[in-house]
Image (cartoon, grey):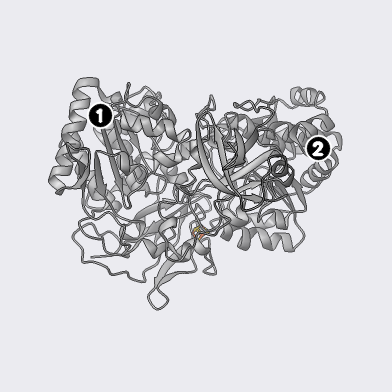
């Protein structure tokens, strides 16, 4: 049976044309299957109001009927091979293995990897399971993309989410896009909301070491050196103040620390800061003037800002600029992180984080734990758990067992060679997924699960809109729905005294709204084919909620300005080395576990090529199309050279979508001290022609 809340036995191989939500990026477009065309088409959902879709949405149903799907449980045998097993064998092994670890080493010897690509209900169940077993070792891959953004915004604004709604952003007169490439990575937001404003004359400032699809529309391209965003943003603040473009009314009413910040800003030498950041000082001045000189200027921020070991500080510097110019709490403005996966926002909202309970209540907050215990029937542990990367660093040591839901951590965590060795050092690795991946290759038990189209539930998009996905396709083989598997694991591992007895995602959603204050009052029926946006029910009907209009998320009227000093990147760059930075391309998605198998999306020759500047190529005797080796002390990959001035001199670029080249063999695992996000965007590497050793 397919349909809204189905969780029982199904037939096989049938996809309905019911409306659901795209499983890929955080835009959250409505998509449905068109049986005549054999692909996805858009419908007039809350975000893609005219049914627009990007190529990934069109290809979304390529998961259905795919011949590489996992269709039976796999268990590693005594010869070290993964072999098919019955469900009871597989689940018995999970139960006995985790019990043994719990008995011998205690609950903190387990780590749970939830998934920002799974529904709110599934993430809620994973974190409840971890906490019911006595550990806060639960995290999701939002740790790896925007945890630093969330940390800085929560600290300054009291809320770690887009301050504005997609719907009000066309009112902007200027866009500052920092470390993001929305024309390629969030295409429907760019084409349907940003581009119309640009056509009306809005200015686009693009801060990125690489000219890409977004840059084509930009009035200013500031090709910042990876890791040098802070001096660039400080210089923009200094220009705003020196040209009398600070918003004095806003500063007087809504901001604290103004005098101290102005005094500190006097020490900022704009020319020197621009040069340190690797951009032309006069371009920077003009761009700062155009951002600060309009009534409404919006920031989009992405992983180019957040994925540094100083990611939190980077975002703090960005928040200074928005506050200084009064671009907070009004339409067409704000600071707007573009979330990568379809439920990055929701996975954190519902508590799949090691330090916060559902609704971002701190695990150390006695009142929060007590409130939740009234619903759960047990009090969650109060010691913050390990983040994703911290957990992998302790695999085989304090952490003996791991459960991974729908993530490909062997490919997506930094320093992949180290991660691969650490995965093999676990006593028990359980992976629940839909395709064989680089991570299932290390697993002791693989549980074949449901694709996005085979399950129901809610997801929360990048501007806080909660929407409903429907089960529109049949499960393949003996695969089971994630929801059912998580309930089954809960019942087996925790017992009957704590409820994992839910009839469907609707049941779970009801419970999670009762313990997640920002979702309080939402309902499955209320969402229907539309959305409900948090904070609910403010402006729920319009879908245009602008946060911080009168007060910030913690109830205070004022946010503070805060001097931010430059932090040197973790990797020192030697004379013969270049800086590797990474990113996405339009047709692919994260580790590529799904999109690289798509029949509709094709892997273009240029997509896994190493972009290198002509001067750097020439200095190394590299021609376009050459096979090159990219290496450092952490690892080595090979790629084809794409010699192009689109990438700044001294920097090279690779995407992270492919197992070959697996770029995370090269990335470092130095962590941001606050958000524990790794330094993905600045890795020192040596590049040479493949045969030139
Ligand atoms: Fe899917 Fe994002 Fe493309 Fe919309 S923009 S179709 S949500 S991948």
Is 417 situated above or below 449? above
Is 530 situated above or below 420? below
Mark 2 or mark 1: name the one nearer the start of the chain.
Answer: 2
Residue found at x 44% / y 48%? 343
- The residue closer to the viewer here, 466 or 425, is 425
Spatial separation of the CA atoms under disc 2 and disc 1:
56 Å
Q: Which mark is residue 240?
A: 2
Residue found at x 51% / y 46%? 656
Tell me the quadrant of the picture where the N terminus can be found. bottom left
Residue found at x 75% / y 56%? 202
- The residue closer to the viewer here, 142 or 685, is 685
Residue 6 horizontal side relative to residue 20, left or right: left
- Report whether residue 551 is seen: no
Is 309 situated above or below 596? above
Q: Locate residue 428, reporting x and y percent.
A: 25, 33
Q: Which mark is residue 449?
A: none
Q: Locate residue 429, reporting x and y percent.
A: 28, 36
Q: Locate residue 335, reporting x and y percent.
A: 63, 43
Query: Which residue is under mark 1?
Result: 427
Choose top left, top right, bottom left or bottom right for residue 399.
Answer: top left
Label 2 Cα crowd, 10 Å radius (few <14 / some 14-19 / many 20+): many
Choose top left, top right, bottom left or bottom right for residue 451.
Answer: bottom left
Label 1 Cα crowd, 10 Å radius (few <14 / some 14-19 / many 20+): some
Report the label total: 2
Is 577 situated above or below 290? above
Question: Judging from the image, what secondary structure is the residue with disc 1 in?
Answer: loop
């Amino acid at each position: 049976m397919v349909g809204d809340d189905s969780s029982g036995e199904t037939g096989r191989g049938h996809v309905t044309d019911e409306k659901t939500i795209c499983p890929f990026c955080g835009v959250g477009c409505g998509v449905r299957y068109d049986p005549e065309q054999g692909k996805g088409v858009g419908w007039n959902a809350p975000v893609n109001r005219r049914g627009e879709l990007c190529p990934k949405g069109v290809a979304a149903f390529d998961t259905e009927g795919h011949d590489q799907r996992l269709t039976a449980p796999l268990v590693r045998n005594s010869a070290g091979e993964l072999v098919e097993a019955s469900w009871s064998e597989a689940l018995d092994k999970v139960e006995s293995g985790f019990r043994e670890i719990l008995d011998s080493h205690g609950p903190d010897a387990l780590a749970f990897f939830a998934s920002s690509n799974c529904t709110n209900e599934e993430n809620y169940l994973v974190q409840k399971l971890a906490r019911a077993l006595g550990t806060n070792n639960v995290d999701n891959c939002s740790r790896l993309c925007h945890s630093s953004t969330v940390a800085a915004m929560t600290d300054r604004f009291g809320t770690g989410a887009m301050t504005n709604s997609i719907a009000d952003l066309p009112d902007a007169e200027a866009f500052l896009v920092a470390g993001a490439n929305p024309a390629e990575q969030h295409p429907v937001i760019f084409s349907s909301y940003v581009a119309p404003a640009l056509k009306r004359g809005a200015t686009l400032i693009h801060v990125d070491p690489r000219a890409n699809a977004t840059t084509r529309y930009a009035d200013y391209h500031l090709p910042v050196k990876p890791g040098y965003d802070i001096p660039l943003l400080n210089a923009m603040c200094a220009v705003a103040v020196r040209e009398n473009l600070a918003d004095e009314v806003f500063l007087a009413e809504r901001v604290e620390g103004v005098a101290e910040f102005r005094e500190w800003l006097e020490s900022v030498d704009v020319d020197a800061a621009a040069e340190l950041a690797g951009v032309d000082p006069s371009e920077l001045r003009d761009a700062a003037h155009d951002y600060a000189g309009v009534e409404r200027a919006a920031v989009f921020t992405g992983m180019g800002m957040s994925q540094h070991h100083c990611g939190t500080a980077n975002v703090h510097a960005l928040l200074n600029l928005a506050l200084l110019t009064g671009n907070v709490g009004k339409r067409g403005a704000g600071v707007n992180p573009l979330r990568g996966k379809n439920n990055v926002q929701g996975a954190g909202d519902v508590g799949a984080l090691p330090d916060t309970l559902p609704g971002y209540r701190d695990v150390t907050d006695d009142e929060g734990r007590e409130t939740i215990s009234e619903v759960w029937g047990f009090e969650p542990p109060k010691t913050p758990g390990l983040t994703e990367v911290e957990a992998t660093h302790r695999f085989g040591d304090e952490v003996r067992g791991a459960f991974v839901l729908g993530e490909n951590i062997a490919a997506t965590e930094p320093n992949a060679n180290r991660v691969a060795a650490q995965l093999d050092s676990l006593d028990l690795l359980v992976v629940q997924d839909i395709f064989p991946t680089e991570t299932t290759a290390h697993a002791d038990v693989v549980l074949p699960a449901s694709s996005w189209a085979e399950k129901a539930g809610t997801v929360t998009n990048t501007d806080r809109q909660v929407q409903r996905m429907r089960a529109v396709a049949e499960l393949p083989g003996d695969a089971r729905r994630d929801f059912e598997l998580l309930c089954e694991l809960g019942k087996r591992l925790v017992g009957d005294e704590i409820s994992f007895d839910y009839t469907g995602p609707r049941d779970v959603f009801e419970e999670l709204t009762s313990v997640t204050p920002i979702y309080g009052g939402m309902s499955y029926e209320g969402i229907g084919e539309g959305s409900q946006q948090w904070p609910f029910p403010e402006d729920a009907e319009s879908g245009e909620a602008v946060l911080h209009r009168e007060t910030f998320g913690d109830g205070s009227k004022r946010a503070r300005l805060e001097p931010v000093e430059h932090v040197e990147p973790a990797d020192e760059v030697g004379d013969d080395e270049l800086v590797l930075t990474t990113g996405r391309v339009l047709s692919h998605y994260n580790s590529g576990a799904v999109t690289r198998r798509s029949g509709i999306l094709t892997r273009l020759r240029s997509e896994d090529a190493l972009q290198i500047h002509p001067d750097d190529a020439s200095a190394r005797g590299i021609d376009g199309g050459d096979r090159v080796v990219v290496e450092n002390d952490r690892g080595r990959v090979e790629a084809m050279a794409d010699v192009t001035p689109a990438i700044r001199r001294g920097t090279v670029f690779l995407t992270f979508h492919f197992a070959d080249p697996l770029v995370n063999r090269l990335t470092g695992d130095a962590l941001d001290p606050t958000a524990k996000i790794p330094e993905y965007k600045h890795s020192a590497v040596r590049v040479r022609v493949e045969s030139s050793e």
